[in-house]
């Protein structure tokens, strides 16, 4: 009799265990297929269950290996960490948690910032190398702020003092043509801007600007002419100390314009180079008759810029059409 009771008790226990295990397996499958529950419905349960679906061949074996699977999933590289106050779980790599300290993150961020800054500087230098002479324009404010005096040109490239010309009887016949020679830059700049379509009239009658590499050639020539006019006006009629400061600005714009022509048009043709060489002679030689020699520099340099731009545009256009 006791033997029958024991057999019945064992049978009932096995049936209850099988039913409980089936319910628990159904719950696990329900948890896998319902990720929204993981976000907050059961916040206290933070275990990671195996994601492999049991096949029909090993279904019975997988039911009784639930504890083993649970232990193996808990020892994987991903740990479920509860975030206080937000009632949701986040996944964090164990190696990340051990090696990523605030100091490591700071070093990595600093390294990335330095690499990005270096790359940006290199790209800017390669693209805008022609504007380096503009740093000459910083010399006058540097001298005023840190030295408390005006900037002065070096002795080997000094500004010619024109006070004796302004005090002479025929000053007007010298200074007016001298300053008027800067009109060559204005004419050259307007011609190049019109030639390369820097501006045009729209259908509404409005003036539209179209800045391109070639259309900006005329802008650079016009800007150089404007600064040259201001500088030489102060040189001939104003303060010599202020003229020396403006000479830095004049050289900054002129130097950047020349390098921009090199970057856009390439090496000038033989004709343009010849005219440019004669213009450089008129620039370097200052005596006698500085005003007339420098006026020739204005005319010849403007002619060189015009011819250089046209030759460069033709060269680029022919190369693009043949390639």
Image (cartoon, rainbow, N blue to C red):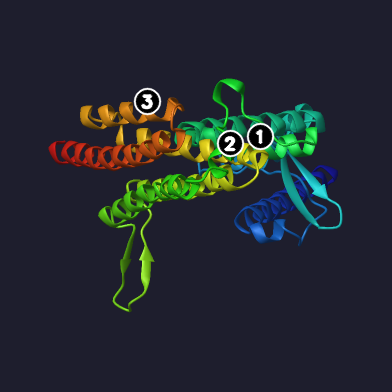
| Left/right of residue 164 with respect to residue 83 in the rendered view | left
For marks 1 and 3 on the same chain, the one whose residue lies earlier in the sequence: 1
Tell me the CA gap for discs 1 and 3: 27 Å
**Is residue 281 rendered to the left or right of residue 171?**
left
> Does 200 sit above or below residue 173?
below
Number of other residues with Cα within 10 Å of mark 2, as a class: few under 14, some 14 to 19, many 20 or more: many
Alpha carbon separation for disc pair 3 and 2: 20 Å
The residue tagged 2 is 248
Asked if residue 153 is positioned above or below residue 162 in the image, the reply reads: above
Taking the spot 29% from the left edge, 57% from the top edge, the residue there is 194
The residue at which mark 1 appears reads as: 139
Secondary-structure class at tag 2 = helix
* Residue 292, percent from left and from top: 40, 37
Q: Is residue 210 left or right of residue 143?
A: left
- Rendering coords of residue 56 (x, y %): 51, 44
Q: Which residue shows up at 75% across the image and 50% down it?
A: 89
In this rendered view, identify the residue nearer to me: 34 or 158.
Answer: 158
Q: Nearer the viewer, residue 48 or 29?
A: 48
Q: Closest to the observer: 76 or 283?
A: 283
- Residue 281 is marked as 3
Residue at image point 80% right, 30% down: 101
Packing grade of label 3 (10 A; few <14, some 14-19, many >=20) is some
First in sequence: mark 1 vs mark 2: 1
Can I make out residue 77 in this image? Answer: no
* Image quarter of the C terminus: top left
> Looking at the image, do the residues carrying marks 1 and 2 touch, with CB atoms under 8 Å apart?
yes
Q: In the figure, residue 135 lies in which quadrant?
A: top right
Q: Is 312 or 147 nearer to us in this picture? A: 147
Label 1 and label 2: CA atoms lie apart by 7 Å
């Amino acid at each position: 009799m006791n033997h029958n009771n024991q057999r019945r008790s064992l049978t009932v226990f096995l049936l209850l265990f099988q039913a409980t295990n089936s319910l628990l397996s159904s719950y696990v499958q329900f948890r896998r297929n319902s990720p929204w529950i993981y976000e907050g419905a059961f916040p206290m349960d933070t275990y990671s269950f195996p994601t492999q679906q049991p096949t029909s061949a090993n279904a019975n074996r997988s039911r009784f290996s639930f504890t083993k699977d649970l232990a193996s999933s808990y020892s994987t590289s991903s740990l479920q960490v509860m975030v206080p106050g937000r009632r949701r779980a986040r996944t964090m790599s164990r190696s990340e948690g051990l090696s990523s300290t605030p100091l490591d993150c700071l070093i990595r961020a600093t390294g990335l910032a330095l690499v990005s800054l270096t790359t940006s500087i290199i790209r800017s230098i390669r693209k805008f190398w022609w504007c380096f002479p503009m740093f000459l324009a910083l010399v006058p404010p540097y001298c005023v702020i840190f030295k408390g005096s005006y900037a002065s040109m070096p002795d080997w490239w000094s500004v010619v003092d024109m006070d004796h010309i302004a005090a002479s009887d025929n000053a007007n016949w010298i200074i007016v043509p001298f300053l008027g020679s800067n009109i060559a830059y204005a004419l050259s700049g307007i011609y190049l801007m019109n030639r390369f379509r820097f501006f045009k009239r729209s259908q509404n009658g409005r003036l539209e600007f179209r800045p391109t590499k070639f259309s900006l050639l005329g802008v650079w020539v016009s800007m150089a002419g404007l600064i040259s006019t201001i500088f030489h006006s102060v040189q001939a009629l104003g303060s010599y100390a202020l003229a020396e400061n403006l000479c830095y600005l004049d050289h900054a714009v002129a130097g950047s314009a020349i390098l921009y022509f090199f970057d856009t048009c390439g090496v000038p043709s033989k004709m343009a180079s010849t005219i440019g060489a004669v213009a450089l002679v008129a620039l370097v030689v200052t005596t006698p008759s500085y005003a007339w020699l420098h006026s020739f520099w204005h005319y010849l340099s403007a002619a060189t810029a015009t011819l250089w731009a046209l030759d460069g545009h033709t060269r680029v256009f022919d190369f693009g059409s043949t390639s």
